[in-house]
Image: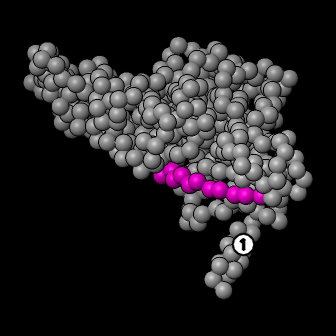
Amino acid sequence: MTDLYQSQRAMRNMRRAAMQRGVIAILDVGSSKITCLILRFDGPDRLREHDGVGPMAGQSSFRVIGAATTRSRGVHFGEISVMNETERAIRTAVQAAQKMANVRVDHVIACFAGADPRSYGLAGEWELQDSVVTEQDVARVMAACDVPDFGPGREVLHAQPVNFALDHRTGLGDPRGQIGNRLAVDMHLLTVEADAIQNLLHCIKRCDLELAGIASSAYVSGISSLVEDEQELGAACIDMGGGATGISIFIKKHMIFADSVRMGGDHVTSDISKGLQVPLATAEKIKTLHGGVVATGMDDREMIDIGADTGDWDKDRRTVSRAELIGIMRPRVEEILEEARARLDAAGFEHLPSQQIVITGGGSQIPGLDGLAARILGQRVRLGRPLRVQGLPQQVTGPGFSSAVGLCLFAAHPQDEWWDFEIPAERYPARSLRRAIKWFKDNW
C-alpha cells in the first residue's frame, strides 16, 4: 500500500516535470489497437492550478501534435499476454507519432482496460484542530478512511474524494478555506490486479519510456464521452472495446463506480469467423462493412460476397444473406449488453437522479446498436463520441478513440487523488494496527 502511494507520488511529480518541459505522450493499450498521441502544452504559465478538488476537464491548454495507431498484438481482454509482441506494437505506435510530431518523448501516460476492476466506497471523519480547513486537514481526513482488505495481488489504481461534508453541510466539492469543526469525506477506491499493472510497467520500461501516470480506460472514456450535465446529474459510460467492455458511473463530476466485462468486439468477429468458416481478417471486414443487429425484410435478399481466399474456388464464391450475418452477431451483442446491465444493477444505477447511458468505443459503431441497447439497458441511451480537442487528426475522432482523448484530458486536468496530498507518515501504514485496536475496544 505504502509503496504504491510513494510510486504514484513519484509518477505525479514526473508528470508535472514533463508538462513543464511541454511535451508528453498518451498511450492507450487496447486489445484491438494501440494508440499514441503526443501533446504539447502551452507552457507552465498556461497550466492553471485548479483550486477545486477534482475539476472535470474542459477544453484544456494543450494541443495534439502527433498521432498514430497500430494493430494491437499480444493483448487479450485488455491485459498483456505476450510481452514481446506488445512491446513491438507500442514501439511502432510511439515512433510513428514522434515522427509526425517531430519531437522525441520520454514520458508516457498509459491507460488499459480489463484487470478485473473492483470499486469500494470509503468514509472518514476528522476533528479540525483549527476552525479553518487546510490542505493538511484534507490529507488527514483521507488517511482516516478505513481501507477495506481487498486481498493480496491487487493494487489501488484510483482513490478519489467524491464528496466532503463540513459539520452538517454536505455536497462540498472543495472544503479548503471553509470554517467548521468536523470534516468528513466519501472516497471512491478502484483496485485492479497487480500483475496487469506490473506487466504494463515492465513493457513500457522495455520500450525505453518512463511511465508518468496510469489510468483505467473505463474512467477516461467517461471523461471524454459524457457531457458536463451528464457527469453532474449521473450517467454511465459503456466503452465497448475489442477484448473488454468497460463500465463507469459518474455523478457530481466524479467517478463513483467502475467495472469491466471480459467481452468485446473481437468476440463478435470470432463468432462470425466460426459461423461462416472464414479467417478472422475476413470476418472483421464483413462485420465492418455489412454488420448489424436489427434485421429488416430487405436483409433476406441482400447477399454478401464472402470472398475468402482459401484456394477452393467453390468455397471462395460463397455468399450469405445479411439476415444470416445479423443472426450470428446479435446474440453476442445482446450478451455483452445484458452483462453490462447486470453490473449497473449491482451498482445501484437505478437510484441516480438521471439514468443516461452513453455507449462508446469501437464496438459501438455496429449499425442498430442504439435501438437494441435501449431495449436492454433502458430508454435513455445515446451513442457517444469523444470531445473535440485541439489538433486532433480526423482519423482519431471516432468513438474508438474515446479512451485516448479522455486520457489527454486526464493528463491536462487530473482530478485530485489520495496521493496528491501529503498523508501524514504516522497515519499511513498503521491500518492493521488501528483496525486491531478498534476490534479490541469493540469486543472487550
Q: Residue at x 42, y 50 (%)?
A: 346
Asked if residue 79 lies in the magenta stretch, the reply is: no
In which quadrant is the N terminus drawn? Answer: bottom right
Task: From the viewer's side, name the closer residue of 75 and 142.
Answer: 142
Using residue 44 as the reference point, say whether residue 203 is left or right of it: left
| Magenta: main secondary structure | strand
Q: Which residue is drawn at 57% across and 59% down?
A: 154
The total of numbered circles placed on residues is 1
Using residue 307 as the reference point, say whether residue 123 is left or right of it: right
Using residue 440 as the reference point, say whether residue 356 is left or right of it: left
Q: In which quarter of the image is residue 282?
A: top left
Residue 329: horizontal and vertical position, in percent? 24, 32
The image's colour scheme reads one colour
44 over 270 or under it: above or below: above
Task: From the viewer's side, name the closer residue of 261 and 65.
Answer: 261
- Residue 208: tell me if it is visible: no
Q: Name the residue under label 1.
A: 434
101 over 212 or under it: above or below: above
Asked if residue 124 lies in the magenta stretch, the reply is: yes
Q: In which quarter of the image is residue 42?
A: top right
Q: Which residue is drawn at 65% across and 56% down?
A: 123
50 over 153 or under it: above or below: above
Q: Give the range drawn in magenta.
A: 114-126
Amino acid under label 1? Arg
**Is label 1 in a helix, a strand or a loop?**
helix
Residue 394: horizontal and vertical position, in percent? 53, 13
In which quadrant is the C terminus drawn? Answer: bottom right
Residue 139: horizontal and vertical position, in percent? 79, 52
Residue 393: horizontal and vertical position, in percent? 57, 14
Task: From the viewer's side, name the closer residue of 109 and 425.
Answer: 425
Q: Residue at x 82, y 49 (%)?
A: 180
Using residue 284 as the reference point, say whether residue 80 is left or right of it: right
